[in-house]
Each structure stands twice: as C-alpha cells, then as structure tokens.
Amino acid sequence: MTENCTLRDKNARLSKSLEDLERKSRKYAVAHSRETRKADPQRSGRWLQIKFTRVILTADLYPGNIMGVDETETYTAFHGHRRLATGPLHDVLAVIKADELDPHVPLLIFEDRTSRPIDLDLRGDLHEVLSRAQLPQKPTGRGRPKLGVVAREVTLLPRHWDWLEAQPGGASAVLRRLIDEARKRHPERERILTAQTATDRFMSVMAGDLPGYQEASRTLYASDHAAFNEHIRDWPEDIRVHTLYLAAPAFGEVLNPPTP
C-alpha cells in the first residue's frame, strides 16, 4: 500500500513537471505550425489537409496599441461633433482635462495615423491619466511585444509551406521580409491605401449616420476628389475638416493638421 502511494505521488509530480515544461515551451515559441484535417465537401470520404502557423508580424503590419500609447504619434479628440484638439497625446489630454465636458456626449480619441479609437481611463488629473496611458500592456500569448511584434495565424497551401520552410530564417522572418519588400516597391500605393483606410475608419465612426457617407466612402476608394468633397460638404464643420485632412494623401495632397 505504501509503495503504491509513493508511486502515485511520483507519477503526479512527474506529470506536473511535464505540464510545466510544455507551458514554458509554448510561452517562448516564436513560430508554431500544426496540421489538421477537414472533410472535403467535394469528395465523399476524402479529407483535406490544412496546415497553419502563428506568424510574428511587426506593429507596422498590425497597427494598434501593442505597447500602450506612443507619444511620437498625433491624436485627435472629438466631443460629439466638436473637435477638441489635434496633437501629441499630452496636449490633447491637457485640453480634455481643462474643459468641462458634458458627460452625456460621447468623447472619442483617435490615433491619426490609423484613425483607431484609443481607450483611456480619464479619471484623475492629467498626470494620473498619462501615467496610466503610458504603462505597457502585459503581453498575452505568443509574440514579442517589446519588439513591436504580435502573433497571428495564417493558412497556406502545402506547396507554399514547402517553399517557406526551405528559406533561411524561418516562416515568420520570410513573410515579414516579403511584405516589407512589397511595400518598398509600391510606396505611393501604400501611402494612398493607408490614407483611404484611416479616412474610411474615421468616417464610419463619426459620420456613419450622416447623409452622403456611403457615397463618400465609394468616391474615396475611387479617387474621385471632386465627388468626395461634394458628398461631405454638408457634414458638421469639424468632422468635415478632419476628414479632408485624413484623406489628403489619398488624393495626392498634404494638409496641415486642423487648428482649434
């Protein structure tokens, strides 16, 4: 009886050690590939083989606040249809904290490069708000947040994986290099697409219910500058001016940030 108990205890400790090792290996893995099978709807009784991997992408390829708020970026705050400020985060938050804003009116802060709204805890004074905003987020899952990279899953055909696995540096490094090279080959197209995406994202949030939004979105991607201006002409002034500022690179223009 005593021997059995001892063996059970040893087995339990060994199982726990193996689980710990597996957890650590998953935590520090950079690229993770696995295969799965799925029933082929076209052929009864046959299976499709699908292979996918987690790929490390840089922050440029996956825009967003991976490490909290970046002070080198510019931001714009809107209180309802009124633009409060555009500039570095410190300046924008200073305007917000100095103004007595109606709590029943939505307050939104956008990152100008992507027009993604950022979520900040605005309780307390300016120093407290900035301190919370600049704290790095804890990394979750695979990836290298300190290097500005995150993990996503992609699916490719077997011949694509065969080619990737034959390249030096691993799948993640090869994919990053291919994307960077494509962006460098077509910088103008990349600049236009970035501006179109940021503009449309801002319009969908701030002007999605306004007359002419659908038409403005279509003419934005069609590069029809005159029609775009016409469709947003009757929008609230601050929303219209900021939309023009974001859309300027998509039409080959450069505008200064709006001023109060």
Image (cartoon, rainbow, N blue to C red):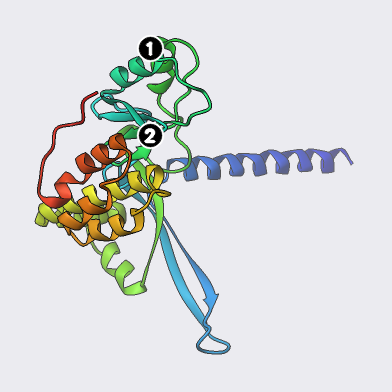
User: Residue 34, labelled with which disc?
Assistant: none
Estimate the x, y position of residue 96 in percent, counting from the top left: 38, 18
Q: Residue at x 33, y 54 (%)?
A: 212
Q: Using the image, determine if residue 172 lies above or below residue 202.
A: below
Query: Could you tell whether 183 is left or right of 12 in the image?
Result: left
C-alpha distance separating marks 2 and 1: 19 Å
**Residue closer to the observer: 36 or 195:** 195
The numbered mark, 2 or 1, whose residue comes first in the sequence reads 2
Estimate the x, y position of residue 194 in percent, counting from the top left: 23, 49
Estimate the x, y position of residue 166 in percent, counting from the top left: 25, 64
Query: Could you tell whether 169 is left or right of 189 in the image?
Result: right
Q: Residue at x 27, y 48 (%)?
A: 232
Residue located farthest toward the front when viewing the structure as drawn: 234
Q: Helix or strand or loop: what does disc 2 sit on?
A: loop
Q: Quadrant of the C terminus?
A: top left
One can see residue 172 in this view: yes
Q: Exactly how many numbered labels are in the figure?
A: 2
Q: Residue at x 21, y 43 (%)?
A: 244
**Residue tagged by mark 2?**
81
Q: Amino acid at mark 2?
A: His
Q: Are marks 2 and 1 in contact (CB under 8 Å)?
A: no
Q: Categorize mark 1 by other alpha carbons within 10 Å: few (<14), some (14-19), many (20+).
A: few
One can see residue 169 in this view: no
Q: Using the image, determine if residue 170 lies above or below residue 104.
A: below
Q: Categorize mark 2 by other alpha carbons within 10 Å: few (<14), some (14-19), many (20+).
A: some
Query: Could you tell whether 187 is left or right of 171 in the image?
Result: left
Between marks 2 and 1 in the image, the one whose residue lies nearer the viewer = 2
**Residue closer to the observer: 149 or 37:** 149
Q: Amino acid at mark 1?
A: Ala
**Residue tagged by mark 1?**
98
